[in-house]
């Protein structure tokens, strides 16, 4: 048996390295799927919440839209107002004990993180939409686009670009916060670490390794997202065409930021 | 000559504020170019916005070729009655070309090829063909407004509403936009133009309408309205704006 701190660290890595790696993989999978799905949920929510019916819409459609908006508000308030660790317990054991559904822990994990992320991103997406000048929505209406068309073709692409940093931030938060899913035995990084630590009673050494792994994950993701953001902000020059024959003239006009 | 737009007893109020439009009756014939002038807050923009239903009238109605606009499918109304905004409102996430293509594709269901042909044609008409790949933020105000006009024309409208199309432009860019608009007049398009450009109203319009406090105060050919206004309020407004 090792006698020093670093001796133990080396020993535990050799012994449980693949456990840490698998745990890290599951963590990344949950955080990735949860962020992307949560983001998709929230974009859909945003389209409904910003919808306004045209003058001719009947009472049925008005009522349906109002009901949908009310339900979405409840969803957002409830999931923002309760801890994710509690949501995981309620979803997992609720399904098991009341619906008779023994859903896999992973499925519960995807569900909880996605829905939770969706609720947290509500305000972010709202802010992103407000950052796009309202005149563009009017112009889209004025060329005959429907609300859905205007949102998907004009408003959301700009809103998404503006909120990309916040989405990346949410991803990082999810990498860390998915650790609470150990309560429903999801085999993510924290759960794996706890198992490894228990065998030799080496909690400090194991969780030292764990924190290094978490940090490497979040740090890498942060850097990668910064690259993606730069991509999304688009090219930095455009070509002025010299004639109608589609020949690009040599003039490349650089973009003032 | 066909009547394109008829406005009947149109009223508009926002919430419990005093009404902004207090009973407007107007009719516009095909090919007419009418300038609407009047002091700030007199309801000019609101009038235009009620015509294409960006605002819902509180009372009265608007007819497009005899049909109540509130009963037309929005896509049809918006294709036939286009609008050009003071702030251009180009789609910032699209090139000049795609600004002109998007509405045709989405609202009219035209093929990409047909939409692009039409877009290129109108971009050329407004002198913006060389900039078809530029993003709005790369264009000057005058260039943006010309793209916005091309975007509206691509929908094959027969009525175009202009809400102060040159007010946000630097003086040296005003003429390039006014020239495009004067061109359009030759094509039989019906144009309703809210403007502070008195010289343009005098030289390029068939008809000038003076609005004040939500009412049409005076309505006549520019020659008459500018040289011999019938109403004291018109005269006072003209005196102020022609001096300034
Ligand atoms: N959405 C709105 N809500 C409340 N009041 C409004 C709204 N839009 C316009 N108004 C009010 O209606 C009145 C007329 O506005 P409108 O924009 O039609 O005037 P205008 O003649 O176009 O003026 P300007 O020359 O300054 O553009 C103003 O007092 C304005 O404050
Ligand atoms: Mg106005």
Image: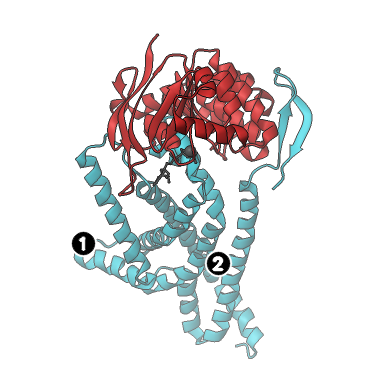
Chain colours: A cyan, B red
Residue A99 image offset from top left, x and y in percent: 21, 62
Quadrant location of residue A80?
A: bottom left
Q: Nearer the viewer, residue A5 or B17?
A: B17
Quadrant location of residue A224?
A: bottom right
Local crowd at mark 1 within 10 Å, few (<14), some, or many (≥20)?
A: few
Q: Is residue A54 above or below residue A65?
A: above
Q: Nearer the viewer, residue B96 or B238?
A: B238
Q: Label 2: chain?
A: A
Q: Which image quadrant: the C terminus of chain B?
A: top right
Q: For the residues tagged 2 and 1, is the chain the same?
A: yes
SS class, disc 2: helix
Residue A53 image offset from top left, x and y in percent: 31, 40
- The residue wearing badge 1 is A99
- The residue sitting at the right extreme is A250
Residue A213 left/right relative to A179: right
Nearer the camera: disc 2 or disc 1:
1
Image quadrant, ligand 1? top left
- The residue wearing badge 2 is A21
Q: Residue at x 21, y 62 (%)?
A: A100
Residue B3 image offset from top left, x and y in percent: 37, 14
SS class, disc 1: loop
Q: How many marks?
A: 2
Q: Residue at x 65, y 85 (%)?
A: A7
| Residue B230 visible from this viewpoint | yes
Q: Is residue B206 above or below residue B83?
A: above
């Amino acid at each position: 048996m090792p006698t020093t701190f670093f001796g133990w660290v080396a020993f535990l890595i050799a012994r449980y390295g693949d456990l840490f790696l698998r745990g890290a993989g599951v963590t990344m999978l949950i955080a990735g799927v949860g962020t992307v799905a949560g983001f998709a949920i929230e974009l859909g929510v945003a389209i409904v919440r910003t919808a306004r019916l045209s003058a001719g819409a009947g009472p049925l459609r008005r009522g349906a839209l109002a009901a949908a908006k009310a339900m979405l508000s409840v969803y957002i308030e409830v999931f923002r107002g309760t801890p994710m660790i509690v949501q995981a317990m309620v979803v997992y054991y609720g399904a098991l004990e009341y619906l008779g559904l023994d859903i896999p822990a992973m499925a519960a994990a995807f569900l909880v993180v996605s829905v939770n992320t969706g609720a947290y991103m509500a305000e972010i997406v709202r802010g992103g939409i407000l950052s796009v000048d309202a005149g563009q929505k009017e112009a889209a209406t004025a060329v005959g686009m429907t609300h859905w068309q205007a949102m998907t073709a004009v408003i959301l692409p700009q809103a998404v670009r503006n909120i990309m940093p916040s989405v990346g931030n949410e991803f990082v938060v999810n990498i860390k916060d998915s650790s609470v899913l150990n309560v429903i035995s999801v085999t993510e990084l924290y759960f794996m670490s706890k198992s490894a630590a228990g065998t030799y009673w080496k909690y400090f050494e194991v969780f030292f390794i764990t924190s290094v792994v978490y940090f490497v994950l979040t740090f890498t993701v942060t850097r990668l997202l910064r690259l993606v953001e730069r991509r999304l902000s688009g090219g930095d020059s455009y070509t002025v065409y010299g004639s109608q024959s589609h020949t690009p003239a040599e003039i490349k006009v650089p973009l003032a930021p | 000559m066909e009547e394109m737009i008829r406005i009947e007893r149109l009223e508009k109020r926002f919430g419990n504020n005093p009404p902004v439009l207090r009973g407007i009756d107007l009719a516009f014939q095909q090919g007419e170019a009418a300038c609407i002038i009047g002091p700030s807050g007199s309801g000019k923009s609101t009038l235009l916005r009620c015509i294409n239903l960006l605002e819902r009238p509180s009372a009265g109605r608007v007819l497009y070729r005899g049909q109540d606009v509130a009963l037309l499918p929005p896509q049809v109304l918006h294709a036939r009655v286009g609008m050009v905004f003071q702030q251009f409102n180009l789609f910032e996430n699209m090139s000049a070309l795609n600004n002109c293509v998007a509405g045709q594709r989405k609202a009219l269901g035209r093929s990409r090829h047909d939409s692009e042909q039409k877009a290129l044609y109108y971009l050329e008409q407004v002198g913006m063909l060389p900039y078809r790949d530029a993003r709005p933020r790369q264009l000057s105000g005058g260039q943006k407004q010309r793209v916005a006009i091309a975007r509206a024309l691509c929908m094959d409208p027969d009525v175009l509403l202009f809400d102060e199309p040159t007010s946000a432009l630097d003086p040296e860019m005003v003429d390039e936009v006014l020239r495009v608009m004067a061109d359009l007049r030759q094509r039989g398009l019906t144009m309703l133009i809210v403007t502070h450009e008195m010289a343009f109203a005098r030289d390029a319009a068939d008809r000038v309408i003076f609005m004040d406090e939500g009412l049409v105060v005076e309505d006549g050919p520019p020659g008459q309205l500018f040289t011999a206004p019938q109403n004291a309020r018109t005269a006072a407004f003209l005196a102020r704006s022609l001096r300034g």
